[in-house]
Image (cartoon, rainbow, N blue to C red):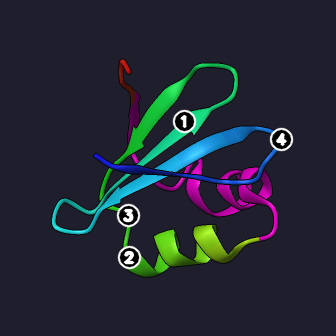
Amino acid sequence: MLHEPVRSSNVRSVGYNQAERALEVAFHSGGLYRYEDVPADVHAALMASSSKGGFLARFIKGRYRYRSVSG
């Protein structure tokens, strides 16, 4: 999945596969997480957000099933 670098103190890059509705988030700490069944509009809102980490905490974590994936 292609990732787009983002400006964030916590998030390094974000990838999205619309066909699979899968969102991947890579963190500066080295973690990479894949969130399942994420709508395209949620991905768009994340990318438009001025605080990627805050958006993740408020609208994605705890709402979508996720797993850690290796880089």
| On-image quarter of the C terminus | top left
Q: Distance between the residues labelled 3 and 1?
A: 16 Å
Magenta part of the protein: which range?
50-67
Secondary-structure class at tag 4: loop
Q: Report the mark closest to the observer, 2 or 1.
A: 1
N-term mark: 4 or 2: 4
Residue 45 picture quarter: bottom right
Residue 62 on the magenta segment: yes
Q: Does residue 67 sit above or below 48 in this rendering?
A: above
Q: Report the mark closest to the observer, 4 or 3.
A: 4
Q: Position of residue 21 (x, y in %)?
A: 27, 63
Secondary-structure class at tag 1: strand
Q: Where is residue 25 in the image (x, y as percent from the top left)?
A: 51, 43
| Residue indicated by mark 4 | 9
Is residue 35 found left or right of 10 in the rendered image? left
Residue 37 on the magenta segment: no
N-term mark: 1 or 4: 4
Q: How far apart are marks 1 and 4 (CA)?
A: 12 Å
Residue drawn at the location 71% of the way across and 51% of the way down: 57
Q: Are the residues tagged 3 and 1 within 8 Å (C-beta)?
A: no
Is 16 or 38 nearer to us in this picture?
A: 16
Q: Are the residues tagged 3 and 2 within 8 Å (C-beta)?
A: no
Secondary-structure class at tag 2: helix
| Residue indicated by mark 1 | 26
Q: Are the residues tagged 1 and 4 within 8 Å (C-beta)?
A: no
Q: Distance between the residues labelled 3 and 2?
A: 7 Å
Is 3 or 56 nearer to us in this picture?
A: 3
| Residue indicated by mark 2 | 40
